[in-house]
Image (cartoon, rainbow, N blue to C red):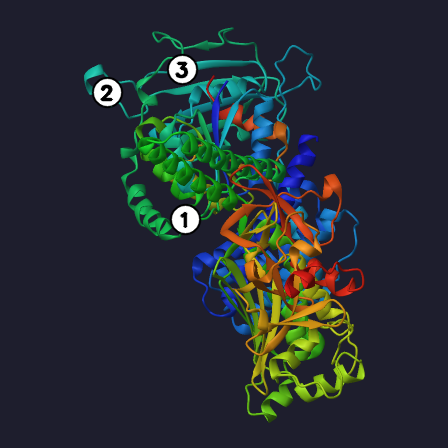
């Protein structure tokens, strides 16, 4: 099963992601903002990164851009987790190098579906 | 606890933090100190509360936070200027939001009366209040994911004339750069129904001309048994714009080939293909964009990470470290007693002691928290009290990062609330009175905290009218608290307001004038081992000062010997120690004694006699007198045999084992392993004042000898 990093400043969202994906047999690590996420991602290789958009210190978009500069994250899917619904943000996410997005609020099975959609196994 | 409930708990804890951050940000906006990151943090807080609320179906909460969020979004994007009036509305919206969160948490469904604030917010955003709540649920409905059908096709199709989709899919290099994988997309299509895949390798150049980061492949996929075009389109949701995509509907015809995935001349798709190795270099223009954003982000100050730990675990740790310190002291004493030439041993023991002290301090520090969590509740209190009393008040807060033990924090809220209310309600004048007195109409209440001499000092100062001493004195005489001919200093008069049953409010308001106020405040503070005083300057304002110990787990004590016993006196109560002359001691009444301390007589009590300690010396020539101050009853001189030393002791409560003993606060274990009782000065003083009748007379006899 995959190792997944969830980056979110909200503990309840991280917990939701964790519980949902742990149910699918994945191992989930947590980071509290973009800066933390980038650091944790650099320390160990994850198979998938799920990140929030609006976070303190470093937002999700900046983190994705930075992540894509790391050689080991070139082919790793990154999903942006957000309540923002406008198309503009999705385009920005893609321009930054995000693989896809998940719209909050989400049910566990929806999350698992999307994760498995982008996760090579 | 089921996972959903656990997440809900986390959500509410988070709401508390977010509400604090929001409040803090809004106040910074009010004082004009807010930068864009602060405003964004407020937006984020409201946004996160709304987002989580949506997940748990708190629709009223979501409805309100949506309007609030819209307004904050306008401020954030610079479309709405945060003028004082706007911020005032936002602050009130913040208060309502925390009410909404509280209502959702209690699950009572108690309606929060937010209509007025909602209308004002709507006025800011230009939205109709009725419509304001509506977009939120609609937004969520629209974004909810429709479950994707996982139909492998082993069932009979429900609708027989199902269209066949012909998908022509040609990824660009950008698609790979974002870690999307064609084979995953094809797999995804395969979940919609039976598929036939043909790879088009015609664009693949000679090996020598092959660019590793270019995309050369495309695929033709035929999807059957999928009635819904949008389902097919949804598969490519993430990659639109990064590929050539053509979805056409075909009339059903016999399958051309049974092949599942055919890619002649190529190994399976799971293997690495050249095109699947893109690099970030493909988007140099994006890198340029990224750099400034990143540098800006790094300048924001570091957020402290925290973990939530069960308080019991921390207490166990605190206890164990306390035991460890005692064991260390015991061991080192014994070793040093038995080893004569212990030069290296004593150096090692010194080091151990040093480390243990550090460990103890570190462990104690776990329990400390900044007073911020209490202070942050005060701005709202001030706003509400000001609104109720028709006063204009500005609250200044200082030193909110000052740290103090969690237990102290928890019990600080109530007295502080009282003091602040008192300052606004009684301390400050009405705007008219202020202007008449030549002051600005807006009064100032200043709340500050700082560490001073191992204690925390919290002050609530107002620039109001000050204490009317004539009125206070008058009232105290009326209530029989002092005699009409009492000669009191200004300070003493000021502090009369802490006496039980004292209230100077001409009308009893529901804010602070129930007459039970300040004496209760003082009792609470004393229970915490602290003291409270008030100072006042007529016409210029008054100031409450509150001093509290930093922790309730350890105590700075003076170790004294009385007969065969060792006692600990809390250092905070000690004023001085004296070696009195016999001539300074006067007999008072049948068996009381007074000690002349530089012209002032204070009651003198022998601890040994009071507690009937065996072996205590009653000879005043051999006694040391310690002058103590009790919050309740004033000064008193305690006679003990000797002073042993001064040290920090770990408080061990024994109330749960043997119940409460008057005059004894708790116990501690000394370095030599012996148990010593910590004296409760207030209880001791009160006890001996009441029980004047049955006192032993040894001390007097000893004195006479």
Q: Are marks 3 and 1 in contact (CB under 8 Å)?
A: no
Question: Residue at 39% across / 52% down in the picture?
Answer: B300
Image x and y of residue B480, in percent: 80, 80
Distance CA(mark 2)–CA(mark 3): 18 Å
At numbered mark 1, what does the secondary structure look like: helix, strand or loop?
Answer: loop
Q: Are marks 2 and 3 on the same chain?
A: yes
- The residue that disc 2 covers is B210
Distance CA(mark 3)–CA(mark 1): 51 Å
- Frontmost of labels 2 and 3 is 2
* Earlier sequence position, callout 2 versus callout 3: 3
- The residue that disc 3 covers is B199
Q: Is residue B290 left or right of residue B701?
A: left
Q: Are marks 1 and 2 on the same chain?
A: yes
Q: Nearer the viewer, residue B39 or B562?
A: B562
* Rendered image: mark on residue B78: none
Q: Nearer the viewer, residue B200 or B639?
A: B639
Image x and y of residue A81, in percent: 52, 38
Question: Residue at 48% across / 7% down in the picture?
Answer: B259
* Earlier sequence position, callout 1 versus callout 2: 2
Q: Are marks 1 and 2 in contact (CB under 8 Å)?
A: no
- The residue that disc 1 covers is B302
Q: Nearer the viewer, residue B119 or B160?
A: B119
């Amino acid at each position: 099963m995959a190792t997944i990093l969830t980056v979110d400043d909200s503990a309840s969202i991280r917990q939701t992601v964790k519980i949902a994906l742990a149910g699918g047999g994945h191992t989930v690590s947590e980071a509290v903002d973009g800066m933390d996420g980038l650091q944790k991602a650099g320390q160990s290789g994850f198979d998938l990164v799920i990140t929030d958009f609006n976070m303190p210190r470093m937002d999700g978009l900046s983190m994705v851009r930075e992540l894509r500069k790391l050689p080991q994250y070139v082919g790793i899917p990154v999903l942006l987790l957000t309540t923002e619904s406008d198309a503009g943000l999705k385009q920005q996410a893609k321009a930054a190098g995000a693989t896809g997005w998940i719209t909050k609020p989400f049910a566990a099975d929806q999350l698992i579906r999307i994760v498995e959609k982008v996760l090579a196994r | 606890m089921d996972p959903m409930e656990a997440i809900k708990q986390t959500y509410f804890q988070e709401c508390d933090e977010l509400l604090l951050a929001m409040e803090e940000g809004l106040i910074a906006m009010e004082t004009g100190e807010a930068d864009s990151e602060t405003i964004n943090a407020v937006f984020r807080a409201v946004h996160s509360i709304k987002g989580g609320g949506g997940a748990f179906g708190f629709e009223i909460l979501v409805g309100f936070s949506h309007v609030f969020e819209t307004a904050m979004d306008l401020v954030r994007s610079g479309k709405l200027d945060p003028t004082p009036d706007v911020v005032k509305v936002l602050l009130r919206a913040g208060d309502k939001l925390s009410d909404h969160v509280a209502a959702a948490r209690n699950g009572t469904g108690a309606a929060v009366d937010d209509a007025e604030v909602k209308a004002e917010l709507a006025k800011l955003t230009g939205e109709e209040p009725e419509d304001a709540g509506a977009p939120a649920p609609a937004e969520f409905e629209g974004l909810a994911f429709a479950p994707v059908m996982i139909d492998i096709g082993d069932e009979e199709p429900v609708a027989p004339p199902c269209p066949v989709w012909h998908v022509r899919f040609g990824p660009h290099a950008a698609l790979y750069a974002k870690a999307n994988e064609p084979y995953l997309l094809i797999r995804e299509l395969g979940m919609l129904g039976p598929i036939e895949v043909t790879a088009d390798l015609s664009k693949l150049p000679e090996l020598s001309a092959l660019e590793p980061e270019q995309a050369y492949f495309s695929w033709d996929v035929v999807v059957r048994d999928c009635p819904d075009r949008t389902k097919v389109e949804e598969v490519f949701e993430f990659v639109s714009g990064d590929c050539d995509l053509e979805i056409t509907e075909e009339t059903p015809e016999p399958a051309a080939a049974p092949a599942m995935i055919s890619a002649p001349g190529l190994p399976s798709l799971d293997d690495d293909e050249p095109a699947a190795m893109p690099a970030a270099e493909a988007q140099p223009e994006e890198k340029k964009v990224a750099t400034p954003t990143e540098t800006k982000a790094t300048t924001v100050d570091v957020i402290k990470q925290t973990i939530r730990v069960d308080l019991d675990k921390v207490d166990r740790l605190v206890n164990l470290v306390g035991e460890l310190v005692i064991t260390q002291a015991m061991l080192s004493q014994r070793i040093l007693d038995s080893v004569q030439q212990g030069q290296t041993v004593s150096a090692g023991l010194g080091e151990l002691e040093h480390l243990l002290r550090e460990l103890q301090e570190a462990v104690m520090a776990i329990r400390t928290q900044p007073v911020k969590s209490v202070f942050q509740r005060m701005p709202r209190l001030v706003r509400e009290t000001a609104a109720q009393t028709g006063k204009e008040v500005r609250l200044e807060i200082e030193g909110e990062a000052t740290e103090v033990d969690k237990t102290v924090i928890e019990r600080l809220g109530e007295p502080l609330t009282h003091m602040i209310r008192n300052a606004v309600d009684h301390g400050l004048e009405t705007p008219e009175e202020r202007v008449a007195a030549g002051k600005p109409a807006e009064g100032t209440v200043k709340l500050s905290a700082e560490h001073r001499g191992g204690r925390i000092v919290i002050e609530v100062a107002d620039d109001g009218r000050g204490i009317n001493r004539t009125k206070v004195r008058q009232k105290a005489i009326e209530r029989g608290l002092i005699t009409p001919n009492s000669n009191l200093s200004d300070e003493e008069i000021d502090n009369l307001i802490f006496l039980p049953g004292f209230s100077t409010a001409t009308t009893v308001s529901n804010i602070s004038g129930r007459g039970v106020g300040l004496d209760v405040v003082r009792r609470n503070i004393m229970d915490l081992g602290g003291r409270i005083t008030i100072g006042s300057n007529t016409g210029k304002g008054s100031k409450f000062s509150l001093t509290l110990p930093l922790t309730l787990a350890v105590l700075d004590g003076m170790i004294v010997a009385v007969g065969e016993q060792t006692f600990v006196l809390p250092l905070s109560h000690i004023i001085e120690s004296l070696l009195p002359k016999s001539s300074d001691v006067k007999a008072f009444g049948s068996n009381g004694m007074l000690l002349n301390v530089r012209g002032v007589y204070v009651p003198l009590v022998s601890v040994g006699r009071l507690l009937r300690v065996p072996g205590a010396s009653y000879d005043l020539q051999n006694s040391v007198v310690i002058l103590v101050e009790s919050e309740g009853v004033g000064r008193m001189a305690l006679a003990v045999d000797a002073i042993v030393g001064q040290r920090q002791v770990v408080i061990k409560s024994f109330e749960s084992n043997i119940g409460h003993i008057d005059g004894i606060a708790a116990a501690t274990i000394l370095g030599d392993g012996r148990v010593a009782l910590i004296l409760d000065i207030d209880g001791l003083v009160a006890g001996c004042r009441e029980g004047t009748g049955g006192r032993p007379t040894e001390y007097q006899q000893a004195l006479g000898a």
